[in-house]
Image (cartoon, helix red, strand yellow):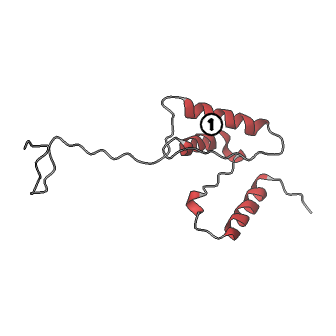
Amino acid sequence: MDELTSPNTEHEPSPSVITRLLRDLPVDTDSFGPHERVASAIAEMVANEPGGIAIAVEGNWGSGKSTIVHILDRKTSDDVFVFDAWAHEDEAPVFYQQACRDCVARLVPQESS
C-alpha cells in the first residue's frame, strides 16, 4: 500500500493534506460585482417606492443572501429594516407580531397628538 491508502494507526495528519475552513460571514465588498449590483437595484427600488416595499432575499446556502443584505444595509442606512428569520425561527408567533410593530413604528412617522 502506498502512503495515501495505507491506514494511519498513529493518527498523525498527513503532511500532504491541508485543511482550510471558510468563515460563513457576509463580506463588506463584492470582489466580483453581482452582489453589489443586486443590492444597488434593491436600494434604488426602496428609494423610489412611495409608501414602502417588502422584499425577501431567497437563495441556496452560500449564495450570498447575507452579503446582499449587508451591502444593502450600508447603502440605505435607516430606510431598510432587516429581519433575520433564521435567527428567530424558534421564537413564538407573538415575537413576530412585535417585530412587525417595531418595524412600523420605526419606518412610519407618528402623528403628534
Query: Which residue is at the front of the view, 5 or 96?
Result: 5
Extreme front residue here?
Answer: 1
Quadrant showing the N terminus = top left
Q: Quadrant of residue 39?
A: top right
Query: Which residue is at the front of the view, 74 or 55?
Result: 55
Q: Residue at x 9, y 57 (%)?
A: 10
The tally of labels here is 1
Label 1: which secondary element: helix
Extreme left residue here?
Answer: 1
Residue topped by disc 1: 39
Query: Which residue is at the front of the view, 111 or 60?
Result: 60
Measured from the top left, where is residue 52 in percent x and y?
Answer: 79, 45
Measured from the top left, where is residue 53 in percent x and y?
Answer: 77, 45
From the viewer's perspective, is 110 left or right of 57?
right
Q: Residue at x 40, y 47 (%)?
A: 23
Indicate the amino acid at tag 1. Answer: Ala
Q: In the figure, 61 relative to 90: above or below? A: above
Extreme right residue here?
Answer: 113
Q: Quadrant of residue 100?
A: bottom right
Quadrant showing the C terminus = bottom right
Measured from the top left, where is residue 90 in percent x and y?
Answer: 58, 67
From the viewer's perspective, is 14 left or right of 58?
left
